[in-house]
Image (tube, rainbow, N blue to C red):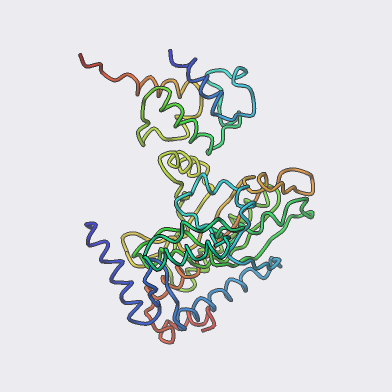
Amino acid sequence: MAADALDDVYQRYLSALIDARLLIPSGVRGLYGLGGVFEGVVEHFEAYVTRMGAHLSPEVMRFPPLLSRDTYGKTDHLETFPNLLGSVHSFLGDERHAMELARRKEAGEDWSKELRAAETVLIPAACYPLYPTATGTLPPGGRTVDLRSFVFRHEPSDDPARMQCFRQREYVRLGTPDEALAHRNFWLTRGEEMLHAVGLDAKPVVANDPFFGRGGRVMAATQREQTLKYELVATVANPDKPTAIVSCNYHLDHFGGAFDIRTADGEVAHTACIGFGLERIALALFARHGFEPARWPAPVRAVLEL
Amino acid sequence: MYAERVREIVSQHGRLSVPVAELADDSDLYQAGLTSLATVGLMLALEDGFDIEFPDNMLSRRTFGSIASLAAAVEQLAAKPVLV
């Protein structure tokens, strides 16, 4: 398919979603409000995730979508994804300085030059705020944590599935290498079953994170060779190019080392997560079953308790 | 012929957990603590040091796996025909 035609595929689906009041455009590419029907599907899918993870008795933790700048500095996100970063800046000056800020706005100039970095950055993944709170020694058997947050990635796009701000629901495992890998593999299978049960043509593929730049290609190749990341992909806007709607990752000791998280035996902890891309899953469901959940197939409605 | 200079650059930019002097040319650099992030710095330093550019198909774990594989890659890329 030619590039223009491909763009059309995404824009057509985006227009249809907006016409149906499922997405509410904001004027910024990739930033949307969600209509009640859309949000209802997200809520029901989340409840489904909760039911399917209940046997793990996860600790529930909810963080705002912000992370301390100091904590962020302990990760290598800045080095590996600088192009996706969102950083909070605010005005720290005095009254005289504020006049200059207002003057710049009035004159149509770039007033952001008057701002300074505040204490926080936007989180790129729902599990980032967890790790600094886990510094220290894990209980025997490790921990399983249930997280959900809006996350931010600066990648403006007309593909409705590529939002700048969206929600991830995660189950994170912190423990030994075996425990982390077993968690990743369990959820890879369970996640695929869950998506099939709601009628999605999901399948697992070996994947890589979109590391920045040419150097990032080496990192991506390394990640693929080690099969650290799998995605469950399904059709959203473009049948020829399925979209990742769930991600299952084994981080090795990446976060355990950065935040000095230890197993009960004193080894550096390994971590793994499954992340459900809630808006993308809803978009896949709307693409598959239509825009009216009331008319979705009975088995799908039953699974989602719609 | 490039191994010595490659070794020097790996020593400066590889951030290995063992001294480069203790490694053989065919030792596994990843076993020696080369991280994927350090690989990026190493790639850029090699490109600057030899005035070369790694093509996409060489940006793999195999290329960066040992001093010998890096020296071979550099030799291949540096061996441009000289126009007179």
Rendered position, A298 above or below A66 = below
A133 with respect to B64 (left or right): right
**Outermost residue toward the front?**
A96
Instruction: Locate residue B12, reporting x and y percent.
Output: 55, 25
Position of the N terminus of chain A, as image quadrant, is bottom left
Instruction: Locate residue B82, reporting x and y percent.
Output: 25, 16
Front residue of A284 and A126: A126
Rendered position, A43 above or below A261 = below
Instruction: Locate residue A275, reporting x and y percent.
Output: 55, 61
Q: Who's the residue at 59% across and 21% down the image?
A: B20
Q: Who's the residue at 44% across and 35% down the image?
A: B60
Question: Which quadrant of the figure has residue A268?
Answer: top right
Rendered position, A71 above or below A47 = above
Front residue of A211 and A299: A211
Question: Which quadrant of the figure has residue A52?
Answer: bottom right
Instruction: Locate residue A46, reporting x and y percent.
Output: 56, 74
Question: Which quadrant of the figure has residue A157?
Answer: bottom left
Q: Who's the residue at 45% across and 54% down the image?
A: A205
